[in-house]
Amino acid sequence: MAEKFRNFIGGEWVEPTTGEYFENRNPADTDDLIGLFPRSGREDLERAVASAKVGFEKWRSTPAPERGAILRRVGDIMTARKDEIARIATREMGKVLEETRGDVQEGIDTAYYAATEGRRLFGYTVPSELRDKWAMTYRRPIGVCGLITPFNFPMAIPTWKMFPALVCGNAVILKPAEDVPHTATILVEILIEAGLPPEVVQLVHGFGEEVGAALVEHPEVPVISFTGSTETGAKIGEVCGRMHKRLSLEMGGKNAQIVMPDANMDLAIDGVLWGAFGTTGQRCTATSRLLLHDDIHDEFLDRLVERTKALRVGNGLEKGVDVGPLINQAALDKVESYVEIGRQEGGEVVVGGKRATGPGLDRGFFYEPTIIRGVRPGSRLALEEIFGPVLSVIRFSDLDEAFRINNEVKYGLSSALYTSDVRAAFRAMAEL
Ligand code: NAD
């Protein structure tokens, strides 16, 4: 029998009122059932909001340095459990252990950062232009914050949202991505162990369109913080705008790495390999476009293809693996369809371009690291986020053209320029 996990609501681990559960399986081996997680509904959310309001009343009057001290203990516990948590995260998310260790480390760093902020929640005093008037600001918590997170950084992203909200005295409701519910469960266990008053945090598992949407629409949740796809963020933005909620959105990207002839080529090749194929390309800041100057285009690409062929695809829990699986079947189908689009648009697949097969790969969502050359600026492959191990190569002949190509996407997340010309680097800071 698979283990049944629970929500954390009202200071205890509880079953969903719906009585329904969904399966969480290892994307590297779908025979490996990690557990059943609550498919929560509106009633569960109502209970979570009611409890968070109780938690907020206790927490908002707790002195900020004391709140910070609890977060420091959270960081200590995460440090002690780092390897164990990384294994749990890799098993449900797929990326290699070294990366999930980094993911947990981000959570640890965020805990210590937030802990010290507990002593730095300063306000301003402002000289007033009126006599006998005192002008100042000071910080008060807002209330119950709804936090909705994606699958690709199962520990780091929930902590980025949660710890700052908590140190400022808010209560939180976390709705983690349905592909990575186990890591979120561990995070909440740690918060409680560290001494957070139980009702200050609620964990509500379930599907985005169901309990996620209900959280966004709830009138007693005045703050929403979301990280995920641009499409979902747009829907959430509409609701929050209509309801005058405070909203933070972090969404997609179509990031470029530009390489000039005067670049350190070894560094540039290492950068693109990690940028394009690390986390199996499932990173908001993944390098999805490689912009190569005419003078180095062919030689650079030859070397890059050789290095790409040497990458080992496999289960992220195994030693020596460089690239893990995609998160689920839908992601694999999406990557396949984009490679097909790339071919139809006239691009040439120079490495990869198909599902990865071989020993140990038949039950996971594996795709070969793929490079497509001859991608035209303005084509779909040059403009749309793929979120997989697919790199589109585009040529250019001068820096201004590279800046133009870089900037033609609707996203604005990250860009990189490899050059040894400091003037070009400083121009890039202004132009990209
Ligand atoms: P997603 O949008 O499919 O899901 C993100 C979260 O939103 C999940 O918890 C999901 O259940 C929930 N959700 C889905 N529909 C919802 C709805 N209608 N109402 C409320 N919640 C809903 O994204 P994903 O596939 O998990 O993550 C990948 C995306 O996240 C990529 O586009 C990536 O670029 C982006 N991302 C951005 C950053 C950043 O910092 N900018 C960081 C990581 C990931």
Image (cartoon, rainbow, N blue to C red):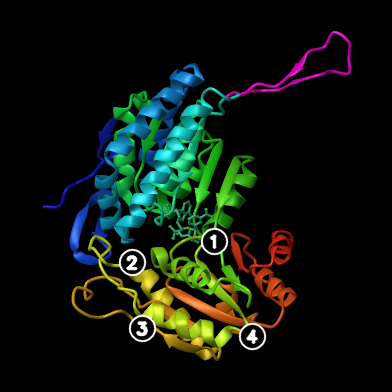
For label 4, the residue is 294
Dot 3 and dot 4 residues touching (CB under 8 Å) = no
Q: Which mark is residue 354?
A: 3
Residue type at mark 3: give it: Lys
* Mark 1 sits near ligand 1, with its Cβ under 8 Å away: yes
Q: Earlier in the sequence, mark 2 or mark 1?
A: 1
Mark-to-mark CA distance, 2 and 4: 37 Å
Query: Helix or strand or loop: what does disc 1 sit on?
Result: loop
* Mark 3 sits near ligand 1, with its Cβ under 8 Å away: no
The residue sitting at 37% across, 25% down in the picture is 196
* Quarter of the image where the C terminus is located: bottom right
Q: Nearer the viewer, residue 208 or 250?
A: 250
The residue sitting at 30% across, 73% down in the picture is 312
* Mark 4 sits near ligand 1, with its Cβ under 8 Å away: no
Residue type at mark 2: give it: Asn
Mark-to-mark CA distance, 2 and 1: 18 Å
